[in-house]
Amino acid sequence: MVTTMPNESVWDAKIGKANTQTIEYEKRYTLNGQKGTLRLLGFLNNGKFGNYDLAIAQNPKAPNMDTTATNLWEGEPVLASSTAIR
């Protein structure tokens, strides 16, 4: 679930329109005797989000995120790798 408006504490119960999906993958490996882990993480948020750039452009001294809130998808893939150091 996500909030009904940006930076609020009221949760949106319309989970068909306001939700978050997360996917994680982890693969442990050994390469030249060194143990490591490859992690891939992706997420996608669907909900009413404000546009920070637009809010600042409209009123730089007191940006109002509520005036720019629209239903948006936003997400980002993340790739991380770690290797044990001896």
Image (cartoon, rainbow, N blue to C red):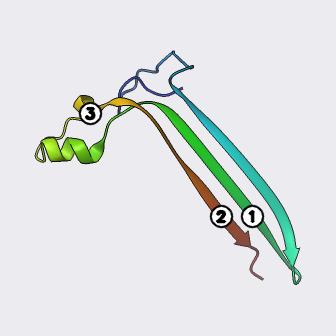
Which labelled disc corresponds to residue 80? 2
Please say if 71 is above or below 58.
Answer: above
- How far apart are labels 2 and 3 at the CA level? 33 Å
Q: Position of residue 81 (x, y in %)?
A: 69, 68
| Residue at 77% in and 65% down | 37
Q: Amino acid at mark 3?
A: Thr
Give the number of the mark in front: 3 or 1: 3
In the rendered image, which quarter contains the N terminus? top right
| Residue at 50% in and 24% down | 18
Q: Is residue 55 left or right of residue 46?
A: left
Q: Is residue 17 left or right of residue 33?
A: left
| Residue at 28% in and 44% down | 52
> Mark 1 sits on what residue?
38
Q: Amino acid at mark 1?
A: Leu
Pointer 2 local density, CA inside 10 Å: few below 14, some 14–19, many at least 20: few
Quarter-wise, where is residue 9 in the image?
top left
In the rendered image, which quarter contains the C terminus? bottom right
Quarter-wise, where is residue 35 in the image?
bottom right
Q: What SS does tag 3 mark?
A: helix
Which circle's residue, 2 or 1, is located before the other in the chain?
A: 1
- How far apart are labels 3 and 1 at the CA level? 38 Å
- How far apart are labels 2 and 1 at the CA level? 6 Å
Q: Amino acid at mark 2?
A: Ala
Q: Would you say the residues marked 3 and 1 are in contact, meaning their CB atoms lie under 8 Å apart?
A: no
| Towards the viewer: 58 or 60 | 58
Which labelled disc corresponds to residue 63? none
Pointer 1 local density, CA inside 10 Å: few below 14, some 14–19, many at least 20: some
Q: What SS does tag 2 mark?
A: strand
Q: Would you say the residues marked 2 and 1 are in contact, meaning their CB atoms lie under 8 Å apart?
A: yes
Q: Is residue 53 left or right of residue 28?
A: left
Q: Position of residue 58 (x, y in %)?
A: 14, 41
